[in-house]
Amino acid sequence: MPGANMIFTNLAVKPEGAYWLPCWLSLVKTWLFVISALLLSACGGGGGGDSGGAIISSSSVATSVSSSSTSSFSSSSSNSVYISGSVSYDFVPVRKAQGLDYNATAHKPVRAAKVNLIDEAGAVVATAQTDQQGHYTLTSPRDRQVKVQVEAYSYADAAQRWEIRVEDNTANNALYVLEGELLNSGQSDSMRDLHAGSGWDGNQYSQPRAAAPFAILDTAYRSMQSLLEVDPNLTLPTSIFRWSENNTVAIGDYGDGDIGTSFYNGAAVYVLGQAGVDSDEYDAHVIAHEWGHFVEVQLGGRSDSIGGDHSITDRLDMRVAYSEGFANGFSAYVLADPEYRDTFGLRQARSSGFDVSLKNPAVRGWYSESSIQSIFYHLAEFGAFDAIYSVFSDLRYETIPAFTSIFSFAELLAELDPQAFAELDRLMNQQLIVSRDAYGEAETNNGSTQGALPVYVNLVAGGRAVVCSSQQNGQQNKLGVHAFLATTIFASGQYRLLVENNGERAAETDPDIVVNGAGERWVGLSAQVDAESLDLNMQAGERYAIAVTDYQNHADALTPNYQPACFNVSLTSI
């Protein structure tokens, strides 16, 4: 069988619109999306009369391609022939309480992917799409030197409109593709099968990890099916995944692979890939979880999560608990597997995980990721995934002033689907969550945290309220670090929101503010000592939600002998 040739391909990367994920304490980053040229070598393999193939990217990912022998069929026309075949990839499953099980590697079809027929000049001669079994058929001119190219790109462009792309962030966000060798199309119809191998030789990745982008693509495609089941006319922005074997736990330049962890930043999902440390391409729960954040933002129009480290035993900021809990519950439901698993370590031989479906976790409440994930998983399993979808796709979800939490979700679900809400009510009671109001009114579970209740402190225009920011449960994104207030405006006009150190703590403070309401968001993040203010144009009849924190509580380590920072908050007409 002839080996594949060196190849040089240009693939355009579609530009993305600017998007600001409302993690208001994060650094603002500028993302550049470019058109890039891709170059690499490929290796031969398999048997039969077809070619070797390659993953095309500047990170030099390549693979062997097993191909069937060329077979003759009736010609498609006097001037053309059919080239058909199947596209597959190596999927490596995860062993519970262990790591990747390479001995159980299975071939899976590459579904709904774009397939191109490329001639010797690099021009696209024909285009098709793989079906659910990974099959494709292309029409080729007779006696033409052509090769088959499969993009790590799935799409629908009829009643449904969505796209999934897997790119290499260490190669200017180039799109991964799989290619066969340039061969003559001949005088009769023929078959060319392409397979992306894992690159694992039983001890290490000694061959290019060609299957990785297609494993990510297929997990995302599988996750997409749950949305399509409830909305056959689904329209979503492009889902972009950025994976590289150089993506590691170091924090730095994403173009160098220093991404820190797998995460979604509002523009793309970045996926770890460093062998022997942490690689997530086969960790389906991780991929589906991060895509769940994409769904939350793109379908719901917002996420108020402030991000940061989190675990299933933490008492978290309600926005973080809600977002992470939803993503965990979503991944478990769409994969039909409540055992969340993440592999890592030498030879990818270790894993950690937890049971998303657990009904009695160690920490229960509106601030618990464990509680929220259990609620969403069981609500979907109850048959109410369509109801969950209806909440996220409702215009009110995006515009409600209250910060996103299980409370805001419950209030809207009660209006949209009373039957599903009855089940949600039962599940929330099981997790010791009392309120069903967007602002958490009448909630009684304070998480053993002083100042956590009421969830929102009432602020009256012309009056004053006192809230505190503390490290009782940790720093950055834990319960108690941020305090919330709500106010209703009865007269339109200009108002000044002022947050000042109330003097109970001698050490200086650095208050920060976020305000939601009337379809707008205001942010006050200055470095001014002991005070922060915002001038707001507020509308009569509108309710506004306010978050206040002390930036001192966002250090990487707990402050010894820390004293809570308490603030006087006032709203006055100007």
Image (cartoon, grey):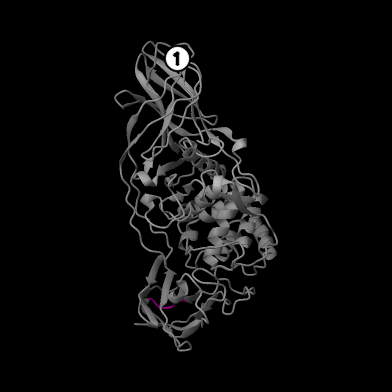
- Does 295 appear above or below 370? above
Amino acid under disc 1: Asp
Q: Can residue 428 be seen by looking at this rendering? A: yes
Q: Nearer the viewer, residue 381 or 328?
A: 328
User: According to the image, label 1 marks what residue?
Assistant: 189
Q: Quadrant of residue 18?
A: bottom left
- Foreground: 290 or 459? 290
What type of secondary structure mainly makes up the magenta span? loop
- Residue 343 x, y percent position in the rendering: 57, 49
Q: Is residue 490 magenta?
A: yes
Task: Tell me which residue sits at (43%, 42%) in the image.
Answer: 166
Residue 32 lies left or right of residue 421; in this view the side is: left
In this rendering, the answer to whether 104 lies above or below 345 is above
Q: Which residues are magenta?
A: 488-492
Instruction: Please rate how many residues cluster around mark 1, counting C-alpha atoms within 10 Å: few if below 14, some from 14 to 19, many from 20.
Output: many
- Number of numbered discs on residues: 1
Residue 500 horizontal/vertical position (percent): 42, 84
Say if residue 544 shows up in the picture.
no
- Estimate the x, y position of residue 494 in percent, counting from the top left: 35, 77
